[in-house]
Amino acid sequence: MSKVIFSDHVLAYKAIPSHCHVKSGTFDTEAKILLTALGSHNFVNQLDVLVPKNALAPATIEELLTQKGSGCVVESNLQGILQFLISLEESSSQENIISTLKLISLDTDVTHQNSISIVHSALHLRLCWPSYEASGFKGALSQMSKGNRDVRGQMYDVSIDISKGLKRLAEEDSDKNSTRLFYFADKEKAKVARYFVASDKLDGKQLQVLLEPTVNSCTVKESSMKKMELGPCKLPDLEIAGKSPNDDDWQESVLEWITYASIGGEQLFPFNKTDSYLSNYSALLESRAQENLVRISLSGILISTEITVRTIQTLTQASWFAVLLHGVKDCNISYGTSTAHSFVEDGANDAVLLGEKNRFVIWEVVDSSDSHN
């Protein structure tokens, strides 16, 4: 099982995965559907854009490249994280930051190690059986542990709503888990772990000022857009108008093409030397045209929905474009608000968007156990 690391990675689907959800519409009338879909992928750590080189003015390309993202790599025990949250609650100028906060454990395998995440104003803990048993929490058996008869190998999920403030919940004693959280943090105070913290409203340097008083160490991590010219590429039929929502063949072929093109798949480009006995994809592709493609990428951080939306808004000037969102896979709540994220297939948490004129199609590829509307 791969650990959460912030590095370049790729995805390429040869067919629509079994747990792929497809939505379509226009940017004018179905924008809310698109925004909801984008916001449901909690921890996106790579964004790739595909666009024809001449479809955007050079100034527009430069505008995309000026976008940056940042966050903080933190070393702390759970007590330090809780004190950070309480400091936000007690500050009148920062009390609304919690709703925009994202935190995820690093260097952790969520299948058998304790992990923490914060998203959508909720604190999520996934605990191994010894930690859970000693904590006194009232939680639920993790989806991935169902069917595991080895009790000591089971994992448990605990979720605490922090939208009203942890300190207030503990003082009112209205949520037993909130009270037990401080007890558990005290017992675990010797255990220091690494986390990545980001916010849709604050950059890394602003977060650092708020984090440093309560954590062991805090390092700002920044990342900016990078451009790569892929060269002349074969294009399939990318026209969305007139396509049926149930046209699985078209949806499958376009998803495959977008993901393959995004990694510079050589069979789409001139001087392809792939042996036809190994793959005849290039010969079978019903190419409608050829265009010089540019790939623009942002990676190495938790990418906010705001950056994604700004990117899409800029790209709508192009005749067509594609956006690929790669989500962190090794976490306890990768999609939506349900902690029922397991690894029945591959823990996938990706989204692929095609925009063409005023229309869009979005493919969401998630794990089979993830909740999905």
Image: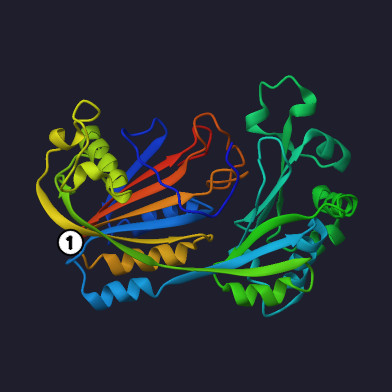
Query: Depth check: 287 or 178 in front?
Result: 287
- In this picture, residue 138 sits left or right of residue 362: right
Residue 270 placed where, x, y %? 15, 48
Residue 333 placed where, x, y %? 60, 45
Residue 2 placed where, x, y %? 57, 40
Residue 105 placed where, x, y %? 67, 52
SS at mark 1 in the image = loop
Where, by quadrant of the figure, is residue 211 drawn? bottom right
| Above or below, comparing residue 350 to residue 58 in the picture | above
Point 27% across, 45% down: residue: 265
Point 54% across, 53% down: residue: 43
Say which amino acid is labelled 1: Ser
Where, by quadrant of the figure, is residue 286 drawn? top left
Q: Residues within 10 Å of mark 1 (few under 14, many from 20)?
A: some
- In this picture, residue 107 sits left or right of residue 216: left
Point 39% across, 43% down: residue: 11
- In this picture, residue 52 sits left or right of residue 14: left
Disc 1 target residue: 319
User: What quarter of the picture does the C terminus occupy?
Assistant: top left
| Above or below, comparing residue 373 to residue 212 in the picture | above
Point 46% across, 71% down: residue: 68
Query: Depth check: 224 or 36 in front?
Result: 224
